[in-house]
Image (cartoon, rainbow, N blue to C red):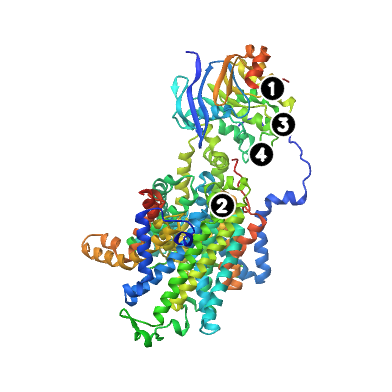
Amino acid sequence: MIRSLLSGDMPRSLPLALILGGILACLALAPFLFPGVRTVDTAARICIFIVLVASYDLLLGYGGIVSFAHTMFFGIGAYGVALTSIHLGRGFDAIAIGALAGAGFAAALALLIGLFSLRVRAIFFAMITLAVASAVAVLVSQLSGLTGGEDGLTFKTPRELGPAFKFGKETFGGVLFGVKLNGKLLAYYFVFIGALVLFLTLLRVVNSPFGRVLQAIRENDFRAESIGYRVVYYRVAATCLSASVAALAGSLYAVWLRYVGPDTVLSMELMIDILLMVVIGGMGTLYGAIIGATLFVLAQNYLQNLMGAASELVQDLPLLPELLSADRWLLWLGVLFILSVYFFPTGVVGRLREKR
Amino acid sequence: MSDAILTLDNVYTNIAQYHILQGVDLVVPRGAVTMLLGRNGVGKTTTLRSIIGHWRAHQGCILFDGEDITKLPTPAIARLGLGFVPEDMGIFADLTVEENMQLAAVSGPINSARLDWIFTAFPPLKTFWKSDAGTLSGGQKQMLSIARAMVEERKLYLIDEPTKGLAPAIISTMAKALKDLKQQGSSVLLVEQNFAVAKALGDSANVMDDGRMIWSGEMAELGRDAALQERLMGLSMEAH
Amino acid sequence: MSAAPEHAPTMAQATLADRIGPYMPVLLVPLLALAGFLAIMNPASWLTLTVSGLAMGMMIFIMASGLTLVFGLMDVINFGHGAFVSVGAFVGITVLMALGQMTAAPSLLLNLGAVLLAVIGAILATGAMGWAFEKVIVAPVYGHHLKQILVTMGGLIVVEQLIIVLWGPEEIYFNRPEALKGAVTFAGAAIEKYRLVAVAVGLAVFAAMRWVLRRTKIGLIVRAGVENGEMVEALGYRLKLVFVGVFIAGSALAGLGGVMWALYQEVITAHMGNHAMILIFIVVIIGGLGSVEGCFIGALLVGLLQNYIAFIEPKAALISNIALMVTILMWRPMGMIPVVKAK
């Protein structure tokens, strides 16, 4: 049962299986284990980033292609839901239409970019996605009539997903294990289940014959081509698939936040975050996405405070307080990133599996 | 073996996971033309590339003029006095013939006496002196490749199949130029599939098979003995 | 140096398309300028825009040239190239601001002296940084594109953050030296002096680069190395050393471009290099990775187009570059002047 859910791709390491199981249990029961607005928000962000990072790993880790447009696809999904929810009125139908339209548009755009760049050389893809993603980010800021510009868009999700919606009064008195049964709880499970389904789908894809061909191409594209696989088709297909899953993750994010804006879903910083999560967790294994996203979001939320404290400790020394200031955490992540690419390119998951 | 310019002792070379050279022994005497023969794919080109350092011998020892060059970087090996004519000719197509030659003259401007000699051996190079090397014909590119090696005096010339795919008329130009080189007393290690050319030029011969040297001796002896030729190199050897 | 050819061989007549083909990229620049003229229909505005487009193009070329050569020579793609632009700008402008008395004085000589010192400072800083970057960041990942992209991107983040640590997170505004302020009027068009200077510097850099590449031995080695590095080594040249030299020179040029870009904008931010990278990438892709001439033409096209479009429809300016890239890649998938590798 578990094996077939995981598409036969078992963790293959006891510590890894325990960690993954722990994360899954925490996320599944987050509203009950860690009640509190901020902690549940953190859990929801972890769920969404796991999907986003896993979809990126399909490209980077399995396809061997670097893209800088992943946030663009993420943003397309988010804006899709926001726009339909505003223009079609709040409702699950609006969310579904927005999410599907976003995923379709993202796939079409990925197809175009892929056909243009991947047929020549894979590094073109990295450069072109960087250019296109920046242009789109600028465009979104400029077309304020449609997108709300820099301010973004606030919108309403179905009433059932809002904090004002209460349920279970008759059976549980509106409270279960001390947690209020309201729409926010439902919204969390909407995100959690959505993320779980998307992740398992991706797991199925990478363990399908398609996924194996992608890995063969990553190892030696010349040989894969000469066996008879059209490398370009496979790479473009992976790009489209990855883009549409990223867009769906964006839709989940929009539903959770009930807001979209260029800084939250399109920024270059977010793109760098994704890269870090993939590399830290481990490229070429979707379980890396779970570990990477969890570690990163937790670190983002709690490590910054720690750095702030450290900075205060050394405030009389020259330069050090500046280096340790909470705002400079990207500096240390950058250093960590370079070191991980050099010294442990297989990430946390790779390390855990080695120790087996 | 004091008069050996180049000695390979039990050289092993791998390319990726493939073991191409499996203990090659080779002695190239000074002032003579040494032939390296064998069927396709037995490791002749790999032997030359291991000498110049494009591929690394991971075991064994290569001595050039008394110096161990096994682990030296390619440029340092070349500067010891090796002229290399690769199988693919290695022409710089975007550079003119003149620029190709200037680049090959590592230690300074081209010596005009040597250039005259090259022009006599390969007249087309004079004609196309200012043209892009990419516009030359296959035979002319091969001439340029050899001329680049000859533009300065080298202690040893490594030449990989200079007659491959060329018209008979050009082959004889090539053979004549190599004979010139030989008459000047240069040391040459020559890979050649054309047995007539090999017979005309070679002093000694070495035959490879499957990454090893299977026969070494006088070229004349091999040239006389048809049965030996067939045993060593199969029937594929064409005798023009 | 040696005997001239005795006779010039005649070639068969090529078709018109075949003969124009190689010059087509060069012709695109005047063609685009002409198209711009037809679209704008106002000679004075057109002239102003053309000069500013050329100035922008020259600056992009200076920033991008190192990137394209480094790729051509060693197959190294440096996503951190923009870091040199930022560092060049910050070091240069810091020097310039320290020389406030020289820049404020109404003396051309003092002004230019200050700018020259700023440029030298920027070039030295970015050249040294290029050397360190090559050793620490790039050298361990030769021959591995995926890791190169990741690691150099990481390098860019670290450098950007270090700039913020050293100079603070705020953007820094400053004034151009007196001599570079203002405009000259020519045929009814106001042309900023600084843009003319930028065009002149750009042309000088391009000419110098071509001279080095065509007329010196080191240039021969670089050009040959772009095509077939293995053979250059077999001739006895240490290509790795040449490459490090090119990397340093390319970084210094990016630093020079950074100072020029900063003087053009009159504001610097830590992210300016990252932003410049977008245009730089478009330029090297449409030019043909590895080709200096292609990079030059591509930069001019991007500069001109961006200025014309910004005049006609401001919001479309950034998209226009993407459209240009798409069009050129449809025409020539490897860029305008593709560099053919022997291997």
Contact, CB < 8 Å: mark 2 with mark 4?
no
Contact, CB < 8 Å: mark 3 with mark 1?
no
* Residue beneath disc 2: A213
Q: Under tag 2, what secondary structure?
A: helix
Work out how far the residue at label 4 is from the one at label 3, CA to CA, in angstroms: 20 Å
Work out how far the residue at label 3 is from the one at label 2, CA to CA, in angstroms: 59 Å
Residue C84 rendering spot, x and y as whole percentages? 43, 55
Residue situated furthest bottom in the rendering: A170
Work out how far the residue at label 2 is from the one at label 4, CA to CA, in angstroms: 38 Å
Work out how far the residue at label 3 is from the one at label 1, CA to CA, in angstroms: 46 Å
Marks 4/1 same chain: yes
**Which numbered disc, 2 or 4, marks the residue closer to the eye?**
2
Viewer-proximal residue, B129 or A166?
A166
**B33 above or below B15?**
above
Q: Residue at x 67, y 65 (%)?
A: C35
Contact, CB < 8 Å: mark 4 with mark 1?
no
Q: Under tag 1, what secondary structure?
A: loop
* Residue beneath disc 1: B235
Label ID, residue C6: 3
- Crowding at mark 1 (Cα within 10 Å: few <14, some 14-19, many 20+): few
Label ID, residue B134: 4
Viewer-proximal residue, C248 or B85?
B85
**Which numbered disc, 3 or 2, marks the residue closer to the eye?**
2
Which amino acid type is shown beneath numbered disc 2? Val
Contact, CB < 8 Å: mark 3 with mark 2?
no
- Chain letter belonging to callout 3: C
Which amino acid type is shown beneath numbered disc 4? Gly
Marks 4/3 same chain: no
Left or right of B16 in this view: A189: left
Q: Under tag 3, what secondary structure?
A: loop
Contact, CB < 8 Å: mark 4 with mark 3?
no
Name the N-terminal-most of marks 4 and 1: 4
